[in-house]
Amino acid sequence: MSSTYGIVAVTLVSLATLAIGAYGWRFSRTTSDFFVASRSVRPALNASAIGGEYLSAASFLGVAGLVLAFGTEMLWYPVGWTAGYLVLLVLVAAPLRRSGAYTLPDFAEARLESRTVRRVSSVLVVAIGWLYLMPQFQGAGLSLGTVAGTEPWVGGVIVAVVVLLNVMSGGMRSITFVQAFQYWLKLTALLVPVMFLLLVWAGDGAPEPGRAAGAGRLADEVWSSLLASTSEHPMYTTYSIIIATFLGTMGLPHVVVRFYTNPDGRTARRTTLVVLGLLGLFYLLPPVYGALGRIYAPDLVGGGRADTVVLELPSRMVGGVGGDLLSALTTAGAFAAFLSTSSGLTIAVAGVLSQDVMGRSFRGVRAFQAAAVVAVAVPLLLAVLADGVGVARAVGLAFAVAASTFCPLLVLGIWWRRLTDVGAIAGLAVGGGLSGMAVVDTLLRNTHSGWTGALLSHPAAWTVPAAFATMVVFSLLTPRRLPVNLSQTMVRLHTPEDIALDRGPYPL
């Protein structure tokens, strides 16, 4: 692919992001604007923004790379990432919005009336946010390196600078407009090229010069190779992926904070329904790139560049200027993915850092802006140091940590009256510690075989039950630690706003 087209695409996406963000600056005046857009974002706009924020480097590049490298067993990732919103809709969305909190630590403190739970939750929000930001910067470096031959850190720095300019200037209000635009850009960036690629594939009766051998194989041979599993323990891997993705969505700080921007619980549920449709539409496309990559770009697996298949396929299959333009379009979509997800994560992490780490004497917009710098700098450094960890794999680990910590806290905190602060802290410690061990092992690139490798690569199947069980057992052992205002809090969480009589300590 011509590097000129790729550089132009990245430049245009960055400028468009800054321009749309500048439009949102005019509406960002208060602390509430920066944190939750004054709780006034309507379902259609919020759903597009959530789609833009949620569809990260793992969705745009990683799914296709996983299908290319490991086959259809990896399709559980997009299925789980979409279904996670269904679980979120049923169990969490409306009560969480009714809590009136700004962040997950706010909810934890309001529900359990414990500053200690808030502190532990704050640490986990920052850890999950950084773990999720790291692959965004890695993906940006990989993409720009593929199209322009730059060093791996260059793309990450560009994304970090653009994100900081938008977040520090306009906060959540500004980012909402940016992310809504970026969802539709990402969808277009995959949809338009794939139509041309499928036409080429359908017309291939025999391999052409320069194409990988076997490009004209019969369809049944292609799909039979896709169905082959490369995992030593495919059944365990599948169920662990399902648990992590189904339950991890509700524990991601940048996802949860979006529901605080809705006016009320009813619009939070409507937003989630629209999101399900938008995600389902998008996730039809990346697996097609992975499948076609097995025919036209099998060398990317051996070369360790499976995550670049979306970027390279158009130029390989179409060729010429047309192929370069289509590759430039996918590059633009990839950078939109990095920018939108990084923006949402930076908002979430900066919000927690500014409220819970910087101290009571340093609050408001200035604290938020300073926290945003820290929120971006640390994962950018980690992205450079942890080069070589697959984009989708790193994101999958973030989901496993979220599923092992905040999922039990939210589900039990909303639906089980007997959860205590001691039980919550113990569960967060066990779930976070066990899943964190798997993360460290992956970042250090320790290669294990057999069951050890399977358990550490996909820890959710055993860390999530351990966290739930710990919270339940320790709560039952400490019944006197129930919050004083428990009944009032539970009524608040489960009573629709239009009939609620007591709105509690947080503004709705």
Image: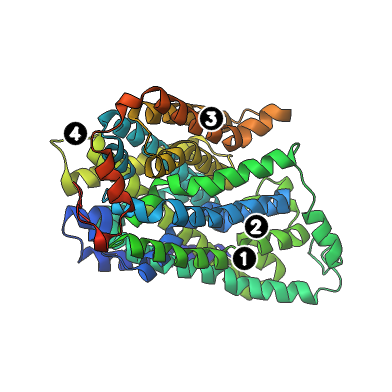
Reading the chain from its start, which is encountered first: label 4 or label 3?
4
Q: Report crowding for label 4: few under 14, some 14 to 19, many 20 or more residues within 10 A (C-alpha).
A: few
Residue 27 relative to residue 334: left or right: left
Q: Nearer the viewer, residue 109 or 503?
A: 503
Mark 1: amino acid: Leu
Q: CA distance from mark 4 to mark 2?
A: 46 Å
For residue 309, the mark is: 2
Q: Residue at x 36, y 23 (%)?
A: 478
Q: Is residue 399 above or below residue 481?
A: below
Reading the chain from its start, which is encountered first: label 2 or label 1?
1
Q: Quadrant of the C terminus?
A: bottom left
Q: Secondary structure at mark 2?
A: helix
Q: Are marks 4 and 3 in contact (CB under 8 Å)?
A: no
Of circles 2 and 1, the one toward us is: 1
Reading the chain from its start, which is encountered first: label 4 or label 1?
1
Mark 4: amino acid: Gly
Residue 440 relative to residue 352: left or right: right
Of circles 2 and 3, the one toward us is: 3
Q: Which residue is mark 3?
A: 466
Q: CA distance from mark 4 to mark 1?
A: 46 Å
Image location (x, y in percent) of residue 199: 72, 77
Q: CA distance from mark 3 to mark 1?
A: 34 Å
Any part of residue 300 in sight: no
Q: Which residue is mark 4?
A: 359
Q: Are marks 2 and 3 in contact (CB under 8 Å)?
A: no
